[in-house]
Image: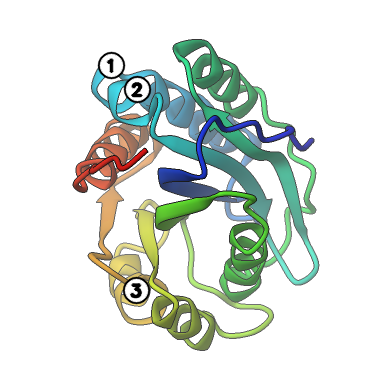
Amino acid sequence: MANTLNVGRDHIELAIVLAVDGSASVTYEEFGLIAGGMAAALRDPTVAAGLVGHSILSLLLWSGLGQKDIITGWSAIETAADLDDFAAGVDNMPRTVAAGTTAIGEALLASLTLLANIPVIPRRNIVNVIGDGRSNDGIAPGPVRDRMAAADITINGLCILHEEPDLLTFYTNEVIGGPNAFAVTCRGYQDFTEAMRQKLTREIKGPIVWSD
């Protein structure tokens, strides 16, 4: 599903792609926890205050090679109602990709395509890669990450460590990059909401200087 973007200015502060792992390592119960946790984090008052009026968001679901779907296209978060509508879509996102392999490089390419098709100019571009495993299919993420970083796109990560306790090392070396890039971790899905909240809070703390 893609929303029609309607922004009342030529420039906005922040464009965020939420790129969510739908591969086989994520059970259906865990997928529901990701969706619910992301929606709860988006509705957090501090996060909401930083997003409303300053951001556009999109939601991408991905797994293996050729398995990616734009669940929600670019959505202008002009009001609290806009954010609530977007969060509701996150909370209820369907699992539309095959629960197969993990192709993070392909997810980055899909995110890059999304960012290349924004009809406004963001001051900051961020891709949030959310997953619980290393890339094992498709193009390697490192070269795509480097290409995006060279274009001043930030790739941040949220690593769920329940199956791969050293996943942060892989994300640090192969996935995250660009201005002020970082990755956060959670031990398991029970900690996901708080990790996502902290991640979004950190991302929206960049300076906002308007020149309407």
Q: Which SS class for mark 3?
A: loop
* Residue where numbered disc 1 is placed: 45
**Residue 65 against residue 6 in the figure, above or below:** below
Q: Which SS class for mark 2?
A: helix
Q: CA distance from mark 1 to mark 3?
A: 28 Å
Report whether 118 appears left or right of 55.
right
Image point (48%, 24%), residue name: 39
Q: CA distance from mark 2 to mark 1?
A: 5 Å
> How are the colours assigned in the image?
rainbow
Q: Amino acid at mark 1?
A: Pro
Image point (43%, 84%), residue name: 146
Image point (34%, 38%), residue name: 196
What label sits on residue 48 in the rendered view?
A: 2
Q: Nearer the viewer, residue 199 or 125?
A: 125
Please tell me how crowded label 2 is: few (under 14), some (14-19), or many (20+) other residues with Cα within 10 Å.
many
Q: CA distance from mark 3 to mark 2?
A: 25 Å
**Residue 144 at what x, y percent from top left?**
53, 82
> Which quarter of the rendering shows the C terminus?
top left
Q: Residue extending furthest top?
A: 81
Q: Quadrant of residue 54?
A: top left
